[in-house]
Image (spheres, rainbow, N blue to C red):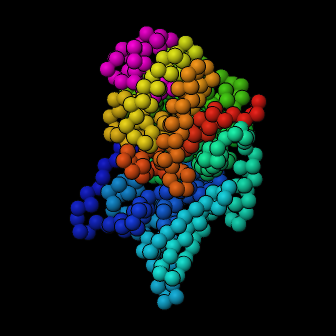
Amino acid sequence: MILAVSALSGGHRGDPRTPPGLPGLPAPFLGAAVVGSGERVAAVDAYGDVVDLRAPGPAGRALVAVSAERQVAGTVPAGDAIVARARLSDGATPPFWRADSIRQRYLPGTNVLRTVARFGAEKAAVVRRIGGPGAAEADRRWLGRARPLAPGAPRWARTMYRRSLLVLRALTDRRTGAVAAGARDGWAYVWPRDAASVAIALAKAGYKVEARRVARFLVGLDLNAAARFSGTGAPVPGRAAQGDAAGWVAAAARAAGLRRDLPIDTGWQWRVKADYQEGDPGDYLANAIASRAGGIASAFVTPRGLVRTAGDPDSGLDSAAAWAVRPFPLPALFPTARRTLLRLVARGGSRFGLVPSENWYGGNEPWTAPTAWSAWALAALARQDDDGRARHAALQLMGDLRRAATPLGLLPERVNARTGLPTSTTPLAWSHAFAILALRELWPGRAGS
């Protein structure tokens, strides 16, 4: 999700100041992990502080919400979070961000997070879980239901696959199927595109019941009303409907095996709407592909590949060309989509992945979702690739994605192009959904899995 943020001034002595982070770690109060299993969900920072807590589900009401605007401005008061503190032998109770060192990890196969702080010779730990002592075992049982990757999948791929599934478990409401894009102020909403990718990934991984729950939630939305929705299905004002919504909902419904009338079948209008880049309305490639519009070749194909804006060769190649391969297969466009994606990978510019499109207006920070969806499409194209370039490019992008992941294995929305450090919401649901889909395309496992 792209959030327009107006930074607070932070220029007055009376303004709160975010405490400084430890060397090599981000400042406190920036969400670095999620805990939860589809009921309540919490975002936890690198120091074990709860910085966002939602109920009754991941897209529900905020019980704790550190403002994203204050995060960017560096003006978060300590009282806005549930702060982890040590109890030292001298009676002091310092916050964990005053420690000499911090280590953080998930208990294996779970969404239970343990943060250990060292203060000199003394050590303190905090465990963040939702669901009581049985939460870890419940997570492991749920993860055990997943279709495995092929036996030849490397260890890093299996690790990314499992962690990505657990992220989707945390961000998907187990009662309603509402999927929060992220556990953060401004992101804890349901975007049809993001949630649909989660439904497709869950279905591919063997979680048909969960996939159907997500798809049913999406089919019940008034997609013309807004770009995003609350956990109850109510439209959230402020952003108009985007042109790919109906197509993604239809794809989710197909993947989940729903049989009912879908919004894409009712004359959905994709033109003159914003696309996944959430800028000005227009006639965009992503929306045309998702809507299976006619005339895509004549409007978007150039000698270099598929461009973002209809009739405008100078609008630049768009990574959404991948969507014409997966999940909206248009075989006539496969050669052009392949050429587009290989060019985007070749021009690269960062070890951490791709920006959304060639003329992307949002700076040079790589985005994990376009990186992962391009890998998914290239892995699919590799089945008919005589020279191996498509699979090589897919694996290159997965390597970029691994470098963009945090030490906990979580995918930020975007990262610094030089350092790979997160610069936005961590983790992001649709990035992990596309990672799952790319991994399953590269190492599909046994027939029918």
Q: What is the magenta range?
A: 294-322
Residue positioned 25% across, 57% down in the render? 9
Whether residue 80 sits left or right of residue 314 in the image: it is right
In-front residue for pair 449/239: 449
Residue positioned 36% across, 14% down in the render? 311
Residue 146, quarter of picture: top right
Residue 338 visible in this rendered orientation of the protein: yes
Q: Is residue 314 magenta?
A: yes
- Viewport quadrant of the N terminus: top left
Residue 80 location (% of width, % of height): 43, 65
Residue 41 location (% of width, % of height): 58, 55
Residue positioned 41% across, 56% down in the render? 67
Whether residue 112 sits left or right of residue 64 in the image: it is right
Residue 277 visible in this rendered orientation of the protein: no
Q: Is residue 165 above or below residue 96?
A: above
Q: Is residue 324 above or below residue 150?
A: above
In-front residue for pair 106/132: 106
Residue 364 location (% of width, % of height): 35, 40
Q: Is residue 146 magenta?
A: no
- Viewport quadrant of the C terminus: top right
